[in-house]
């Protein structure tokens, strides 16, 4: 049984990943208290004392606002911490799966969908740190996958962290009798977290490298929100719950759409955002 180290074990993705694969792999899920990734000596000692086959490195400051406010801390954790993990992987030939981000495309002037080999222009500190971390990984390792993840969604689950996502945001607004504003000028892939988790295992059959990793999507965030309500049987409440925001990103639309051509060419497939939302609602309605 392969031993898999999961960093950032309390996170939205990592907590579900660990639970999903706990019976198939020897999962070692660690948080900051168990492994301080910013301490190079501690990380290297850990790898010397543990025969790790695969590392799923998701530990990061992922809140873009916090990264802007605390840029030095963001760099320390997102970049320096990743360098330490990569060095640890190099010590015993572990394969690194790195949770990167579609934010690497946020500053591109041309419209998406974006392929992996275009010039990357992040426009915030979070994206900057992920790009720098990717570059450092490629300098240290040969056995790596840099996964440019999209925004992800799922329902709230017991004993698992909930992130701010399209489904929970809309459900909370509906339950509280509040409204949520969604932009008509924003386009981005939004992925079902369990489809992401399922597809991570398929990486072992494809070449190492950089991959867009999530759902493709060609409709605006407002229309996605309307689709969520329709899937929940609340189509008659769209105007009560969702504010159609036509002003945000009016001058320059926000486009974070990814192309999955490289994944498809290697036999790995994602449903579209609309299909993934439909699947999620069905699975949690059973």
Image (cartoon, rainbow, N blue to C red):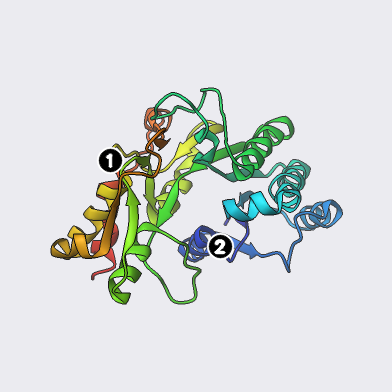
Q: Please, what secondary structure does the residue beneath circle 2 have?
A: loop
In the rendered image, which quarter is residue 87 located in? top right
> In the picture provided, is 26 more to the left or to the right than 33?
left
| Mark-to-mark CA distance, 1 and 2 | 28 Å
Label 1: element kind: loop
Asked if residue 2 is positioned above or below residue 96 in the image, the reply reads below
**In the image, which is nearer the foreground, mark 1 or mark 2?**
1
Residue 215 position, x and y percent, is: 36, 43
| Residue 60 visible in the current orientation | no
Residue topped by disc 1:
219
Please name the residue shown 67% across and 53% down the image. 69
Taking the image as shown, residue 180 lies to the left or right of residue 92, namely left
Taking the spot 47% from the left edge, 25% from the top edge, the residue there is: 109
In the displayed orientation, state which residue is furthest to the right: 41
**Direction from residue 212 to residue 137 in the image, left or right:** right
Residue tagged 2: 11
Query: Residue 246 at x, y = what percent?
Result: 31, 44
Badge 1 density bin: few <14, some 14–19, many ≥20, Cα 10 Å = some
Whether residue 194 appears in this view of the structure is yes
Say if 224 sits above or below 104 in the image. below
């Amino acid at each position: 049984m392969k031993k898999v180290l999961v960093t950032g074990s309390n996170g939205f993705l990592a907590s579900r990943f660990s639970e999903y694969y706990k019976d198939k792999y020897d999962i070692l899920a660690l948080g900051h208290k168990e492994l301080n990734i910013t301490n190079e000596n501690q990380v290297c000692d850990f790898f010397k004392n543990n025969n790790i086959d695969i590392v799923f490195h998701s530990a990061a400051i992922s809140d873009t606002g916090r990264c802007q406010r605390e840029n030095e801390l963001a760099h320390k954790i997102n970049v320096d911490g990743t360098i330490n993990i990569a060095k640890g992987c190099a010590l015993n030939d572990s394969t690194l799966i790195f949770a990167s981000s579609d934010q690497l495309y946020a500053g591109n002037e041309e419209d998406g969908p974006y392929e992996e080999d275009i010039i990357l222009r992040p426009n915030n500190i979070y994206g900057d740190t992920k790009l720098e971390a990717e570059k450092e990984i490629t300098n240290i390792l040969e056995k790596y996958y840099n996964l440019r993840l999209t925004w992800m969604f799922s329902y709230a689950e017991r004993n698992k962290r909930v992130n701010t996502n399209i489904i929970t945001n809309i459900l909370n607004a509906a339950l509280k009798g509040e409204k949520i504003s969604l932009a008509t000028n924003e386009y981005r892939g939004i992925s079902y977290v369990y489809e992401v988790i399922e597809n991570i295992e398929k990486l072992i059959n494809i070449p190492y490298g950089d991959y867009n990793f999530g759902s493709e999507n060609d409709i605006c965030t407002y229309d996605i929100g309307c689709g969520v309500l329709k899937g929940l049987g609340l189509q008659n409440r769209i105007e009560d719950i969702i504010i159609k925001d036509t002003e945000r990103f009016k001058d320059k639309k926000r486009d974070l759409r990814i192309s999955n051509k490289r994944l498809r060419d290697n036999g790995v497939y994602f449903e579209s955002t609309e299909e993934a939302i439909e699947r999620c609602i069905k699975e949690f309605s059973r």
